[in-house]
Image (cartoon, grey):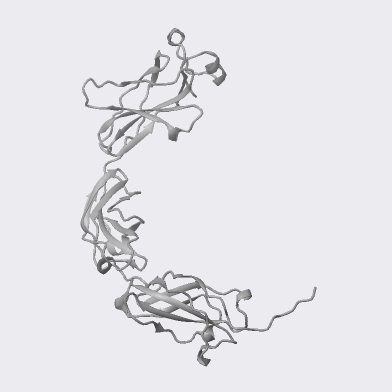
Amino acid sequence: SPQYNTKPGRPTRNVTNIRTGEGGRTGDMIVMWDALTREFQNAPGIYYKVYYKRSGEISFKEVKSLRSLGNINSHTIRIEDRFYYTKFLVQVQVFNDKCIDTEGCVGPMSEPVEVLSAEDLPQVAPTTVGARPFNSTAIRVAWTPIPNVREKVRGKLIGHRIKYWRKDLNEVTESQYVLSRSTLPTALIIGLQPNTYYWVRVMAYNSAGPGPESERFLERTFKLRPQKPPTAVQVYGINPSTIKVTWRYVAPTVQEEPLTGYKIRTWESDKDISQANDTTVYIGTSGFKLEATITDLSPGKTYFLRVLAFSQGGEGKMSSPAWKFQMGDPARLNASPVLSKMSLLSAIIIPLILCRLV
């Protein structure tokens, strides 16, 4: 079918979605909007003018004509550096070849919209920085945050940058960083070496970048976690929902932290180990024995079980292979031998017989 062009005319539509643009350096105010699409331009040569003023000022300032830039969707206005992260009211006016600003034509003007100027770097550092070992390869760092006011943060606080380096290495050349995208005054540094001293510093940061560094703080990671798993694990049925578990003591070396206790980890056979339940036995408690009673298991359910030692250095290796057992009739269980080799089919047919998987 034939196509026809209507006669060109003045623009009748305002721009929409005026907003703050991302980025920019101190002294910038980036204004963005949705440019007019072709069906709303009414004539060739579409272009814009931008007007702005700080909140509280009486009159708008006018940006010089942007005619040479055409149908753009953003413009960066230079303002005084002292007006970092400041609210401005912005309006955008539309022109085209049938409505030119230098000829006195009044194009459609948007409503005033609030826009923020670019941020500046934070001006103060976090204080009272401290750290405590979390385990053999991690340190928990905490600090007093900087006051959340414009003059200190100079923008919107995004998070904190934690700088760390080994005590025996050079800060300038060997430092590493953890970026915490949280305003909470704490962070965890992982991937460290056991029984090693580290210096830490903290910086606040916003979209302009990090602020000044805090004073440094020295802390040591714990020694190694238990390196050997418990052995001679045995499981005994007590009733249809209760079992008793025993194992042999794990002796830590001088390179390892002293043991805190043991965990008996059980989970249903049709679920992942991440959904396991732990029964914890602490060394040094009254009546401590190398055994644990686990209750509230479901009769008829099949479970996996493994035992591990733990300390301040972290969790040790789990016993291997895993025990697999089905809860059922305790009389039949106690009358049956504990089998070390048993097929899954046999484990299902013989209720409540406990077996080691190999």
The residue nearer to you, when weighing 128 against 95, is: 95
**In which quadrant of the rendered image does the N terminus lie?**
bottom right
Residue lying at the far left of the rendered structure: 128
Q: Please tell me in which quadrant of the rendered image residue 171 appears.
A: bottom left
Would residue 229 appear left or right of 326 to someone viewing this image? left
The image shows residue 218 at horizontal and vertical percentages of 21, 53
Q: How many marks?
A: 0
Is 316 above or below relative to 242? Answer: below
The image shows residue 178 at horizontal and vertical percentages of 34, 56
The image shows residue 77 at horizontal and vertical percentages of 41, 80
The residue nearer to you, when weighing 238 against 115, is: 115
At horizontal 49% and vertical 78% (from top left) the residue drawn is 109
The image shows residue 97 at horizontal and vertical percentages of 59, 87
Residue lying at the far bottom of the rendered structure: 103
At horizontal 30% and vertical 25% (from top left) the residue drawn is 249
Residue lying at the far right of the rendered structure: 1
Is 189 above or below relative to 343? Answer: below
The residue nearer to you, when weighing 166 against 158, is: 158
